[in-house]
Image: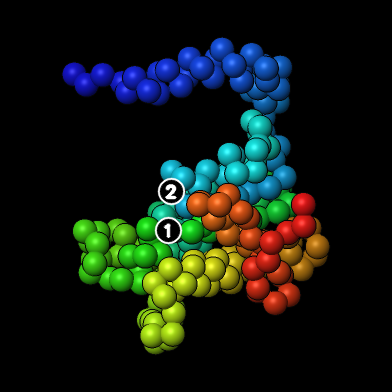
Amino acid sequence: MHRFPDHLLKGHANFMAGRYVREKDRIRDLATEGQNPSTMIIACCDSRAAPEMIFDSGPGEVFVLRNVANLVPTYQPDGGQHGTSAAIEFAVKALGISHIVIMGHGRCGGIKAALNPGSTPLDTGDFIGKWMSMLGDLPSQLGQSGSLLTESERQRAMERISIRNSIRNLRTFPYVADLEADGKLSVHGAWFDISTGELWVMDGDTGDFVRPQL
């Protein structure tokens, strides 16, 4: 029988001796009163881009959904199993969140696979390929200008284009569109640079990504 990973056990011991002690009252309140975050963050599964770390968030402060390449599908109530859509529905309808942030990041493996199909060991005909097909022909359109861009520039551009595409898809959810129109919900885009730790925020009017003033 395999042993539970030692580094996780040690990490939990450190949590109990450190952060749990410091935030015990808050954690216990969350357990009895439930969660009430104001912000949902849809981020990538990449282990280097954890929203709780990036935004220095405590327990109960952000409702986080992570999937491959932080993609959002269009609204498809077809009876299928849609984990991302279910999380969005729960956050908006049950938790009443005020902000949804789509946060991409640099060096995203999912985006790299979409830009370079066939160059990775991932199966394009199975889960990853079908999931990344949500981007449609956007990767091939970007590839047309590949001679003008370096590989890293091309990847960064696609990471940001994908964020804008997910925001468009998110707005196909009727309750998201209605709440946004009523001023009760705000939708945001962000891009995190793993190497430098910088956060770039999407301008809601132009779609450009800019460094926020701290």
Which amino acid, mark 2? Asp
Quarter residue 119 falls in: bottom left
Residue 81 locus on image (x, y percent): 40, 54
| Mark number, residue 148 | none
Residue 142 locus on image (x, y percent): 43, 81
The residue that disc 1 covers is 108
Mark 1 and mark 2 residues within 8 Å of each other at the beta carbon: yes
Q: Residue at x 68, y 20 (%)?
A: 23
Quarter residue 68 falls in: bottom left
Q: Residue at x 57, y 70 (%)?
A: 164
Q: Is residue 213 left or right of residue 94?
A: right
State whether residue 100 appears in this view: yes
Q: Is residue 208 left or right of residue 6?
A: right
Vertical placement of residue 55 versus 9, above or below: below
Vertical placement of residue 28 versus 98, above or below: above
Mark 1 neighbour class, 10 Å CA radius: few under 14, some 14 to 19, many 20 or more: many
What element does badge 2 sit on?
A: loop
Residue 139 locus on image (x, y percent): 40, 77
Quarter residue 210 falls in: bottom right
> How far is mark 1 from mark 2, CA to CA?
7 Å
The residue that disc 2 covers is 46
Q: Is residue 192 left or right of residue 3?
A: right
